[in-house]
Image (tube, helix red, strand yellow):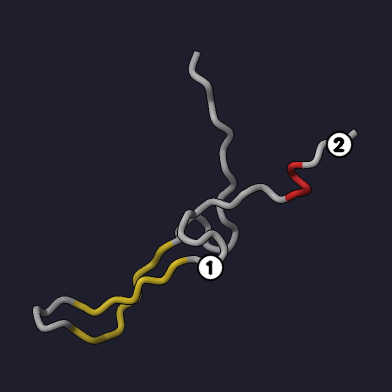
Amino acid sequence: MPAHTPNRPVCRHCDGFPVVSVTTGNRHRDGSRALLRVVCPVCKGAGHTLPSRADLSVRA
């Protein structure tokens, strides 16, 4: 049987869309648009976060 890995929770800050490109309105010499790449500051571009300590604690 295959071993299943647990699902990692999706980042609440970016909802799983960790990297976006924003146009500046300018164009390069070849005609393509100049874009800024913005990465989620919480998950640092992974789209997932680690479970919180409360989720990892074992209840007695």
Which residue is pictured at 10% across the width and 83% down the height? 29
Q: Which three-letter amino acid code belongs to the residue tagged 1?
A: Pro
47 displayed left or right of 22: right
Q: Position of residue 59 (x, y in %)?
A: 86, 36
As drawn, which residue projects farthest toward the right? 60
Q: Quarter of the image holding residue 42?
A: bottom right
Q: What residue does disc 1 label?
A: 41
**Residue count near mark 1 (Cα–Cα under 10 Å), binned few <14, some 14–19, many ≥20:** few
Which residue is pictured at 52% across the width and 62% down the height? 14
Q: What residue does disc 2 label?
A: 59
The secondary structure type at the circle numbered 1 is: loop
Q: Position of residue 16 (x, y in %)?
A: 49, 55
As drawn, which residue projects farthest toward the bottom? 26
Q: Position of residue 52 (x, y in %)?
A: 71, 50
Residue 51, above or below 60: below
Of label 2 and label 1, which has the lower sequence position? 1
Q: Position of residue 3 (x, y in %)?
A: 52, 21
Residue 17, above or below 25: above
20 displayed left or right of 14: left
Count the numbered circles shown: 2
